[in-house]
């Protein structure tokens, strides 16, 4: 897909996302402490860490919900995300899935995906928009990917917890983002659903970069990707799951508890 | 396939009922079968139906609880009232060829600049829409851009209408102060008191309400309407999808204000007076109750709610005036607790597939944060 950065500058051309010394404080509490992280185009990364390590704050900073006190967040080598708000960042190609699944409950599965499809977001367009054949084909294809083809006419609010998670992932796909941020996708899922979700994320990763924040170590192991361990707002350890789980500092603060 | 085709069906039931009953009431009165006063009474109910429809657009679909919507209604009413004042000409009590009576009484010698143009009906018609629309645009732009929402927004809408109430009470504002604008004679050259003019105004109100309903239905069923419902239920989620909720709120807010203004313009010639009392905060709150009674987010429900609640008000204030406010308060509490989807909720109990707005109204509040 379009993982090629536009107007890339030599040195960081092979970087999709670069967090450079990002710090965030809330009322004196340092949620992020000079956090630096580099994500390559097409990479899938798992981010783990104990509660309060700054995982969600990191997502908030990348998506424009929280502005950092210091530091830069560079997307595609040339865009500083800290200067933009949420809709602008979303339109640049960064999608986010929240911990608690948030779908539009009164709308059908179909309409949820329709609203998420990449396209003109202004009222002047949506007032006149008619569903096109192209849009229908896109939605059909996403429905197959997220295994909800048979549920298209059901209301988002009537889906099971796992189905809502998938619908939300489908909405992210519909946005056609270059980078997907996924916050605890398997929390509250059955084992079968967890396994299907890992498969789904790997499938998505074939065309897009993904950052997964997760508590579930079995799930992270199943993903089989590079792992970043956060602790007190900065990176404690980074590497394969086997590497980080043998790191004594990681064992001390996280796994050993 | 997409579950869309139903949305394309022409929504005939509401326009047929609204226009049909207006024509019927007008005909019965003209034929002498029914008393003449029911014409302007029903006309008033239908104008309130327009206001209720406008409130439903912002509250039912946009999640914006406006407690000041009667302000837009009253502004449209004042614009029409100014036209009607200019039609009096030299027939006022003081017989001044140029100035309305209240200006003569205040010893004014020239027409204030903002009264110019109002002797022309098309100009007044533009103002009926432009004034509420512009106020809504400025107010909405500032409020939504600063992400003011929920109860805070409700409070400032209430402050807005109260500020206008105080301003219009002042004689030197040039809108007739306490007494407002009244003693109208003609509209478009027809005697405003005549039975036929009143019948025509009633039918016109029915037609305008029907057209507004069709427009509101088209807007809420469009992709815009779906985004709006999404904004109502999960605003922050729409932002992460790349939508700007503030621009969606602004569009529906301005549209709703213009619709309310048109309702006020139809109200004034039928009632025969517009005064600052129309800005009273309670008027806006009553409009919210009509919507709640009829069924928030259903479009047809609020129209029904406005007509029924006002019919009840007419009956009760005739027999037991001091009981009305208690009855209204009880009604609101009852509807909120027992019938959260209002009267339309009873009708649609077994029709899950209908308007998405109705079903989610109850769950909207808990999704306010994100």
Image (cartoon, helix red, strand yellow):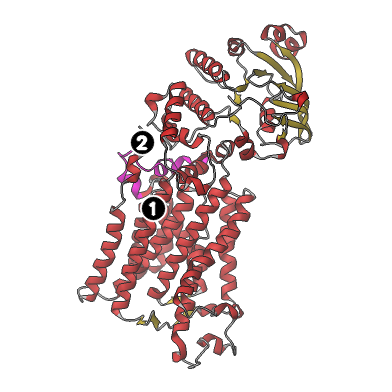
Q: Which quadrant of the rendered structure holds the N terminus of chain B?
A: top left
Residue B242: image location, x then y, percent: 58, 38
Q: Is residue A160 visible?
A: no
Are labels 1 and 2 on one chain?
Answer: yes
**Residue depicted at 51% across the width and 34% down the height:** A116
Q: Residue at x 71, y 34 (%)?
A: A79
Magenta highlight: main SS: helix
Counting other residues with Cα less than 10 Å from the Cα at mark 2, is it few (<14), some (14-19), or many (20 or more)? few
Q: Residue B138: give its label.
A: none
Q: Which residue is mark 1?
A: B293
Vertical placement of residue B1 versus B231, above or below: above
For the residues carrying marks 1 and 2, which lies nearer the camera in this image?
A: 2
Q: Which residues are magenta?
A: B343-366
- Residue closer to the observer: B332 or A24: A24
What residue is pinned by disc 2? B3
Q: Is residue B201 left or right of residue A43?
A: left
Give how far across and how far down residue B56 sits, in percent. 44, 53
Give B275 or B30, whichever is nearer the viewer.
B30
Question: SS class of the residue under badge 1?
Answer: helix
Sequence-wise first label, 1 or 2:
2
Please, is residue B34 above or below residue A208 in the view?
below
Quarter of the image containing the C terminus of chain B?
top right
Report whether residue B178 is seen: yes
A170 on left or right of A223: left
Q: Which quadrant would residue A52 be assigned to in this image?
A: top right
- Circle 1 Cα neighbour tier, 10 Å, few/some/many (<14 / 14–19 / ≥20): many
């Amino acid at each position: 897909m379009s993982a090629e950065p536009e107007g890339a500058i030599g040195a960081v051309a092979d970087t999709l996302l670069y967090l450079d010394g990002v710090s965030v404080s809330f009322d004196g509490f340092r949620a992020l402490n000079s956090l630096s992280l580099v994500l390559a185009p097409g990479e899938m990364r798992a981010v783990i860490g104990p509660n309060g390590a700054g995982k969600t704050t990191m997502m908030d900073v990348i998506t424009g919900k929280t502005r950092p006190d210091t530091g830069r967040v560079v997307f595609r080598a040339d865009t500083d995300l800290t200067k933009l708000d949420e809709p602008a960042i979303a339109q640049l190609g960064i999608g986010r899935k929240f911990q608690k699944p948030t779908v539009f409950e009164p709308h059908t599965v179909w309409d949820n995906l329709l609203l998420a499809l990449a396209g003109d977001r202004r009222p002047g367009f949506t007032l006149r928009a008619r569903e096109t054949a192209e849009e229908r084909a896109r939605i059909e294809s996403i429905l197959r990917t997220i295994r909800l083809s048979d549920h298209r006419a059901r209301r988002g609010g009537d889906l099971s917890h796992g189905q809502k998670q998938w619908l939300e992932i489908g909405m992210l796909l519909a946005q056609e983002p270059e980078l997907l941020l996924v916050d605890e996708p398997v929390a509250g899922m059955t084992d079968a659903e967890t396994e299907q979700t890992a498969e789904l994320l790997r499938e998505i990763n074939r065309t897009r970069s993904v950052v997964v924040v997760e508590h579930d170590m079995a799930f992270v192991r199943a993903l089989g990707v590079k792992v970043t361990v956060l602790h007190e707002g900065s990176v404690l350890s980074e590497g394969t799951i086997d590497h980080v789980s043998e790191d004594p500092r990681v064992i001390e603060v996280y796994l050993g508890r | 396939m997409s579950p869309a085709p139903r949305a394309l069906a022409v929504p005939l039931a509401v326009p047929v009922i609204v226009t049909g009953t207006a024509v019927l009431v007008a005909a019965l009165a003209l034929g002498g079968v029914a008393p003449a006063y029911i014409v302007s009474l029903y006309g008033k109910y239908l104008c309130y139906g327009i206001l209720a429809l406008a409130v439903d657009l912002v509250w039912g679909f946009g999640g914006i609880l406006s407690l000041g919507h009667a302000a837009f209604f009253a502004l449209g009413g004042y614009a029409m009232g100014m036209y009607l004042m200019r039609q009096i000409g030299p027939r006022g009590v003081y017989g001044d060829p140029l100035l309305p009576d209240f200006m003569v009484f205040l010893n004014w010698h020239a027409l204030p600049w903002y009264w110019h143009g109002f002797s022309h009906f098309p100009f007044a018609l533009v103002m009926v829409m432009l004034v509420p629309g512009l106020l809504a645009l400025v107010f909405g732009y500032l409020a939504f851009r600063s992400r003011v929402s929920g109860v805070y927004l409700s409070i400032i809408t209430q402050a807005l209408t109260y500020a206008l109430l105080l301003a219009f009470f002042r004689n030197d504002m040039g809108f007739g102060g306490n007494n407002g604008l009244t003693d109208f004679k003609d509209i478009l050259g027809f005697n405003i008191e005549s039975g036929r003019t009143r019948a025509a105004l009633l039918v016109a109100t029915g037609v305008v309400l029907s057209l507004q309903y069709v427009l509101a239905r088209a807007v809420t069923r469009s992709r815009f309407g779906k985004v709006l419902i999404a904004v109502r239920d999960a605003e922050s989620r729409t932002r992460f999808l790349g939508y700007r909720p503030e621009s969606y709120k602004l569009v529906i807010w301005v549209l709703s204000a213009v619709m309310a203004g048109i309702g006020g313009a139809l109200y004034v010639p039928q009632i025969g007076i517009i005064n600052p009392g129309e800005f009273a905060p309670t008027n806006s709150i009553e409009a919210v109750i009509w919507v709640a009674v009829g069924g928030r987010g259903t479009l047809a429900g609020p129209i029904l709610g406005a007509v029924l609640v006002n019919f009840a008000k007419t009956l009760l204030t005739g027999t037991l005036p001091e009981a009305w406010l208690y009855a209204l308060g009880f009604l609101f509490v009852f509807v909120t607790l027992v019938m959260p989807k209002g009267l339309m909720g009873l009708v649609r109990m077994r029709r899950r597939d209908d308007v998405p707005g109705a079903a989610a109204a109850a769950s909207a509040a808990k999704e306010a944060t994100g």
